Image: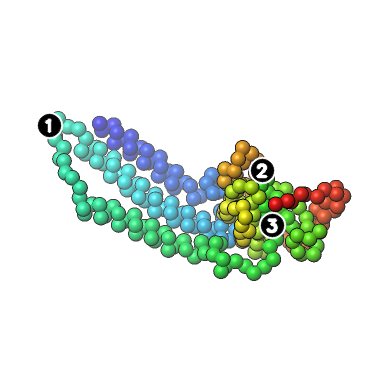
Amino acid sequence: MRYWSIFFGLVGLACVACFAYAPFDPEWWLPGGPDSRVSHLHSPSTVGREIDALFVIILWITGVVFVGTQVVLAWAVWKFGDAPGRVAIYFHGSQRLELIWTMIPAIVLVFITLYQFETWSKIKFKSNEPSIAPVAEVTGRQFQWLIRYPGPDGKFRTSDDLYTINDLHLVKNDKTLIHLMAKDVLHSFFLPQLRIKQDAVPGLKISVWFDADQAGKYELVCAELCGWGHGRMRGVVTVHETKAEFDDWLKTVAREQNRDQVTVVEGR
Ligand SMILES: [Cu+2]
């Protein structure tokens, strides 16, 4: 029986090792930006790093609780294991214990709720939506992201709109606003490196705002199982160093679109 206490003790030790290592390797745990290995900053986004800090705090809370309960478990198995002549004591219920194990998690959860509130409100509360023109309209459909840019006139749904598939472009350090839609079923617009995730819902136009402060290429994936081709809904987010670079790219798209004479049929 005492072997079990050694086993539980070792499991605990292995988990402590993972727990200690997790926050320090962005590739292993939370995907980072191109500079993350150098700077040890996780997300290439200001709010993203706040979210990372929340992850680390929750990791500490769960880590301490896990280690504590594991130590008690190993100790109890060691100390109170089966022994000849020893009889277990039976008792039914303990109001005091029940109160303790209800109140402690409740307090921890209330703390987390209040602590994360400001970060959550920054990216999700309508009142914090930046009053800027959206960079693009992103429409999830089985099985791709259709991305519409306003074109030279700066207005959506006009004849000079530009389209890309699975190819989202932004400018570094600019607040980015996106209008998110879905054509057929639920999709989920997920930018893992920027820590942004938002459901795309048919019939709704949802605003998503964020920033990226390291130029580079990041992933855009669908995080909602939306059908057989769900795994193909992968795109690239390109964060340009400057607005001029972004405008150049947009001009290239305009040239190609005019040359191909391809019109993306939007429909509804
Ligand atoms: Cu999907």
Residue at mark 2: C-beta within 8 A of ligand 1: yes
Q: CA distance from mark 1 to mark 2?
A: 67 Å
Secondary element at tag 1:
loop
Quadrant where the image shows the N terminus: top left
Q: Earlier in the sequence, mark 2 or mark 3?
A: 3
Q: Where residue 17 sits in the image (x, y, percent)?
A: 42, 43
Name the residue rendered at 61%, 52% in the picture: 202
When the figure is inspected, residue 111 is found, relative to residue 229, above or below; the finding is: below
Circles 1, 2 touching at the beta carbon (< 8 Å):
no
Helix, strand or loop under label 2: loop
Tell me: 61 left or right of 265.
left
Question: Which residue type does callout 3 highlight?
Answer: Glu
Give me the residue at 24% from left, 37% from top: 78
Is residue 231 at least partly visible in the picture? Answer: no
Q: Quadrant of residue 13?
A: top left
Q: Which is nearer the eye, 15 or 162?
A: 162
Query: Which numbered circle lies on residue 243?
Result: none
Q: Is residue 165 left or right of residue 198?
A: right
Q: Residue furthest left?
A: 85
Mark 1 neighbour class, 10 Å CA radius: few under 14, some 14 to 19, many 20 or more: few
Amino acid bearing label 1? Gly
Q: x%, y% of residue 144?
A: 68, 45
Instruction: Give the mark, 1 or 3, whose residue is nearer the N terminus.
Output: 1
Please indicate, yes or no, whether residue 86 appears anywhere in the rendered image.
Answer: yes
Which residue has dot 2 on it?
Answer: 143
> Residue 89, percent across and down?
15, 40
Q: Which residue is mark 1?
A: 85
How many marks the image carries: the answer is 3
Tell me the residue that label 3 is attached to: 137
| x, y percent for residue 36 | 59, 52
Label 2 – label 3 distance at C-alpha: 16 Å
Query: What residue sits 54% from the left and 58% below the top?
Result: 49
